[in-house]
Image: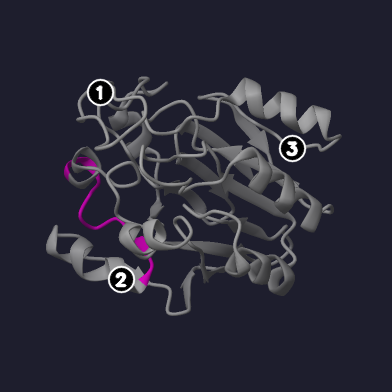
Amino acid sequence: MHLQLFRHATMHLSLPEGTILIDPMLSAQGALDPVPHSPNPRANPLVPLPLLPNEIVKSSNACLVTHLHRDHFDTAAAQLLPKELPIFCPPFATAALQEQGFKSVQAAAPQAHWQQLRLTLTEGQHGLGEIGRQMGAVAGFVLTGPDRPSLYLAGDTVWCPEVAEALATHQPDIIILYGGGARFTHAGPITMTEKDILTVCRHAPQAQVIVVHMEAFDHCLLSRNQLRLDLAAAGVNALVPNDGDIITLD
């Protein structure tokens, strides 16, 4: 099992079944408007992909989409992905993907299967209180299969009871968190802050924790360097990869 981070939440997860493209945002650097009410308004994405989008798509055997916000599934992805590519998603995203012409959309309700891989839906909160309600439904997934570690992809969520429940229920060996402390000028964070990430690490000390979703969209304020410093100061071991990095999962 290997994970390659391309940018933000866009990754390749290489498994015995094949390579899964996760949350594809394939737009060119600066092709998207700033996030409304961003504390740091700039054209998005802030950085380029380390590979050409066609190269990423060509080596993908399936796709997993946590939700349909444009930094997780953008117009470029909708145009570039083959319409026959298997796409796994939460039930709330199924109709929109089918309307875009995708012919092999499978909702995890609460589970989906691809060959020997089982994908189990988990819940989260894309911010607490009113901002979370305004951001809408989000989801994560637990991926399990024979003779391999289990993997929990938390998705766009802050620390909340749903995340605690997923950790307690599934006891994942590997956890991928969406960090960045994304926020707007008028509300609290809508993805994990350094405090949230440390809380997850302390609740799952046995797990290999990997943090992505940083330095690519204008409303994500937590930098990789700051998070690495906070993790080191707390004596917590977690991986904070750079774009293009490949991680062996064991």
Relative side of 216 to 245, left or right: left
Taking depth in this image into account, of 181 and 15 the one nearest to the observer is 181
Q: In the drawing, what numbered circle is on residue 92?
A: 2
Q: Residue at x 64, y 24 (%)?
A: 226
Q: In the drawing, what numbered circle is on residue 43?
A: 1
Magenta stretch bounds: 79-90
Taking depth in this image into account, of 163 and 14 the one nearest to the observer is 163
Residue 21 screen position, x and y as percent? 42, 46
Taking depth in this image into account, of 109 and 230 the one nearest to the observer is 230
Q: Amino acid at mark 2?
A: Phe
Q: Mark 1 or mark 3, which has the lower sequence index? A: 1
Q: Are marks 1 and 2 in contact (CB under 8 Å)?
A: no
Q: Residue furthest front?
A: 186
Q: Is residue 51 visible?
A: yes
Q: Mark 1 or mark 2, which has the lower sequence index? A: 1
* Residue linked to disc 3: 238
Taking depth in this image into account, of 120 and 127 the one nearest to the observer is 127
